[in-house]
Amino acid sequence: MSGNDILVTDGLSKRFGDFSAVSDVSLRIQRGTIHALIGPNGAGKTTCFNMLTKFIAPSSGRITFNDRDITAMRPADVARLGLVRSFQISAVFPHLTALENVRIALQRKRGDSFDFWRSKSALEPLNLRALELLDSVGLTSFAYSKAGEISYGRKRALEFATTLAVEPEMMLLDEPMAGMGHEDIDRIAELIRHVSANRTILMVEHNLQVVANLSHRITVLTRGRVLAEGDYRTVSENDEVREAYMGAGHA
């Protein structure tokens, strides 16, 4: 793991009228790591995540990616720099096959218009890379299955493949395990570990077992502020963290 920072926030805050959802949050995400953002309900995780991914503008503070100020940038411009929110760029079309979905994402990376009207032969050069991406997420045998007919967990894997098609340097995952059973959770957790080999990942996740198994570093938010930060052992043994979770009804 590299010791330099890829994504940094300084004094990030967001107010909605008189309500302060996020207050003075400063993060340093190291390149090549899996960093988790956790906290009880209402801690400000989603608001913070939406500011990082440029879906809402901060009231104050600064965000830098690879030493470039992205605070005022639009989501699409930030994505072009290599900071991509999974399930944001990727849009799974249920009536198209898994292969066709990934191929569309590859067209987007290439900068061409979506060639729905062109002959299949015109898109053949993209098939090899699309198949490689499907293989990387364990979907080779589902390449010619329609996306709407595969399981929920495999749809999420397909979304990973379409996100990887745009070659992100850093991926931001918003509750990647939401709505999944144990088998799918294990599959997606292993997938996250696999795709993190050559990139940085920041994720918001409620499943603390997943966080414990995957994360190199964890930031705990409560009431819009950073409560604790460190590896899983450090934050799990923090009395204030335990109180925050127990007080919010979490185990």
Image (cartoon, rainbow, N blue to C red):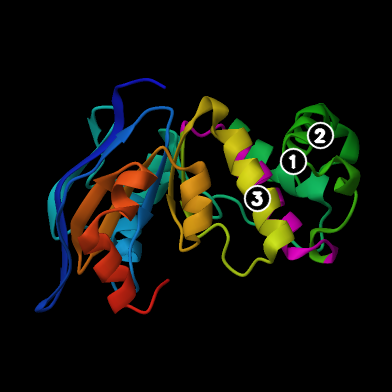
User: As displayed, is residue 68 above or below residue 154?
Assistant: above
Mark in front: 1 vs 2: 2
Mark in front: 3 vs 1: 3
Which of the two discs, 3 and 2, labels the residue nearer the N terminus? 2
Could you tell whether 225 is left or right of 155 in the image?
A: left
Mark in front: 3 vs 2: 3
Mark 2 residue element: helix
Expressed as whole percent of the image width and height from the top left, the position of residue 213 reads: 52, 45
State the residue position of label 3.
Answer: 188
**Residue 71 quadrant:** top left
At 77% from the left and 30% from the top, the residue drawn is 132
User: As displayed, is residue 108 above or below residue 97?
Assistant: above
Mark 1 residue element: helix
Label 2 neighbourhood size at 10 Å, few (<14), some (14-19), many (20+)?
A: some
Which of the two discs, 1 and 2, labels the residue nearer the N terminus? 1
Which of the two discs, 3 and 1, labels the residue nearer the N terminus? 1
State the residue position of label 2.
Answer: 131
Disc 1 residue type?
Arg
**Measured Cα–Cα span from mark 3 to mark 1:** 22 Å
- The range drawn in magenta is 149-169
User: As displayed, is residue 244 above or below residue 189?
Assistant: below
At 63% from the left and 56% from the top, the residue drawn is 91
The answer to whether marks 1 and 2 mark residues whose Cβ atoms lie closer than 8 Å is no
Expressed as whole percent of the image width and height from the top left, the position of residue 114 reads: 68, 46
State the residue position of label 1.
Answer: 103
User: As displayed, is residue 188 above or below residue 123?
Assistant: below
